[in-house]
Amino acid sequence: MTPLAAYLMVAALLFAIGLAGALTRRNAILVLIGIELMLNAANLNLIAFWRYGPHPELLTGMMFAIFSIAVAAAEAAVGLGLVISIYRHARTTDLEQMNRMKG
Amino acid sequence: MGICDLLWLIPAIPIVASGIIALLKQPRRKPAAALAIGSLSISLLLSLWAFAHVLAGWTNHMAVRETFNFTWMQVGAASVQLGWILDPLAAIMLVMVSLVGLLIFIYSVGYMEHDENFTRFFCFLSLFAGAMLGVVISNSILLLFMCWEIVGLTSYLLIGFWYHKPSAAAAAKKAFITTRVGDVFFLLGIVWLFAQTGTLLFYNYGAGSLEALALTNMLAQHAALGLTFAGAIGLLIFCGAAGKSGQLPLHVWLPDAMEGPTPVSALIHAATMVAAGVYLIARVYPLMSAGIQPGGTTTALVVVTWVGSLTAVFAALIAVAQNDIKRILAYSTVSQLGYMMAGLGLGGVAIGMFHLITHAFFKALLFLGAGSVIHGAHEEQDVRKMGGLKSAMPLTFATYAVGMLALCGVPIFFSGFWSKDAILESAHGWPLSRAPYYLLIFGAVLTAFYMTRQVSYAFFGKWRGHGHAHESPRVMTMPLGILAFFAIALGAIGTPAWPWFRAFLGNHAADIDLHAFAEPAWLMLLASSFVIVTVGIGVGWWLYGNKSPAAEEPDALEKAAPVLWTGLSNRLYVDEFYGATFIAFYYWWARVTDFIDRRVWGGIVAGVAWLFGLWARFNQFFDNDWINGGFDKGCEEMANSGGLLARAQNGRVQIYLRILAVGMIALVAILLWSARP
């Protein structure tokens, strides 16, 4: 079997990519995508630790992951709703220009 | 309340009147004149009362010296005492000063009528009268000195009365400074006297500085040149008197003082102020004559005699060649003051004082007469431009003639003869030398000569002036008449047959003894006086008589001895000598001290100021650049830091998130690292 560390590294890599995307992309939707990536990386971590943990036969890990996906979906919906709302107001999705809180 | 306690009123009333007049405005002439004349009349009445009091005491052979002393202020252990004295000397001077003063005040009402500064004139005159009376009654040498200085001040003010005239202003300054030179020595004498005797009072019931105890103390100690302390102090005091009374080296101010109005010349520079010096010597005579042996004399008195005699002749010589009517009289005054001093030195207080009293009256008469002449000749003062006034101004001529004859010492009828004769008699009997006697006789001849010259030029011959001469008003001629009366009558109190004056001052009885007239010594003196007067008047009349040379023509004497005449008419170059020596030195010294003041002290001050400037600039630099600048920089940094900090609030979410991420990684790292075993 592949070692646990490999799964963890992939998950970390995904997480890092997702974080980088969320922190540096200008487009709001791409930020959301980054967030999704981070969530998926966390999911991957969860599944990896479930499989290589003490009780792989139970459904604990899987339930946790499904919860996480559901929450991610809901959160993506809310995020998209926010982006649409902002777009309607500012006519752009460029996060660089969203600095009304400045000062 | 005896008169002695009230004696201070005599000088105080005129001084107060002077103060009130000073507050009046110029146009208020009647009140000013009334105040002045009124106050001096009151002083005269009080003086007569004092005189009567002393006379009564003298007649009853009682002690005639009363004093009233008080302490003015206490300075540590010593006290400054003032006081006044009433004795025959003071009483006679009081009456003379107030009487002559009053007559001159009345005369001034007429003389100064056309002057716009009438009120100011009477203010100063009143102040002078008060101060002079103060000098007379003073028993404290300090009070005497204070009044002496006030007298000098008023003399300055009155000589320079017409101060717009530069010559008058210069003459006033000269008078003040010259008398000041004498006063410096006088002050030294005062200080020394006080140091020696411990008291400022002359007579203080045995403790005074002129009383036996103090005098014996001062006689015991010797200063330089064989002088005792008494003699040395006496000589210092004499310097003050020499300045005030115009004795030889310090006489230069008196002729120039004729710049003042004629009543001033009469009052101050003939009758009273210049007599103050003689009075001072008479007052401190016990000091000057301390240790005198019968038939001998003291060094101080010898000096006084010589200075007096030389002055008498010197001034008489110069008077011969003067052309201004008042200048002739001024030099005559200097000469007669020399006689008075010589009289004091040769014969004592009574001899000198008698001449002072008679001189006061006839010199005041002559000056007032001269004023009348000047007034009548329309402000002309040059005798060569007068003439023939005896018919145009008969009253003035008559009184002037009386004065002139008294001054010349014409025998028997005129007081001047008796007083001058007394001086010549003492000079004749002087143990040390006959020289003063011959000098004084020569002076008498010259006096007769120059007075005849003056009278011939002014009153005889023909009128050489412009316009018409007219007699003066009654207010001016009346005092002339009164003075003329005294110029004759006063002779009676000093004759050898009835030496009342001498007895009064010496506090012994006086008997009428007509046999004194028959004494050969006196008869010889009478004869010599006749000769003197005849020679003087005779030569004068012969040279100047009824001739009236025009003003441009040289004088008769000038034609005879031109070099001598030039020297005499240039006043024997004394002023020029002073100008070349003392005054030149003084100007040089003033330049030196000015240099030191401006360059040396001024340089130091400028240097210190420059240092301060440097310090101030450094302070300014420090303050502006470091403190202000530093503060400004700090505030700037704060503002900038605000800007910097504001950048953290940029409203950009991703930046916030980045910071969060970085922070969290850092935290986790720290936690992991610190959790290591």
Image (tube, rainbow, N blue to C red):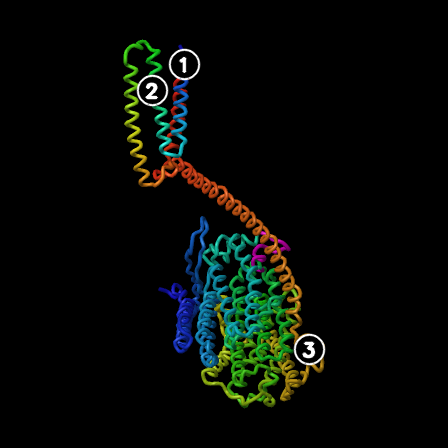
Using the image, name the chain to which the residue with label 3 belongs. Answer: B
- Residue B29 position within the rendered picture, expressed as x and y whole percent measured from the top left: 41, 77
* Amino acid type of the residue that numbered disc 1 sits on in the rendered structure: Ala
Residue A5, numbered circle: 1
Q: Quadrant of residue B227?
A: bottom right
Q: Earlier in the sequence, mark 2 or mark 1?
A: 1
Q: Quadrant of the N terminus of chain B?
A: bottom left
Q: Quadrant of residue B244?
A: bottom right
Badge 2 marks a residue whose secondary structure is helix
Q: Nearer the viewer, residue B634 or B217?
A: B634
Chain part drawn in magenta = B221-235
* Cα distance in 3D space between marks 2 and 1: 15 Å
Q: Main secondary structure of the magenta part?
A: helix
Badge 3 marks a residue whose secondary structure is helix
* Cα distance in 3D space between marks 3 and 1: 150 Å
Residue that carries the numbered disc 3 in the rendered image: B565
Whether residue B48 is visible, yes or no, is no
- Residue A1 position within the rendered picture, expressed as x and y whole percent measured from the top left: 40, 10
Using the image, name the chain to which the residue with label 2 belongs. Answer: A
Q: Is residue B436 left or right of residue B368?
A: right
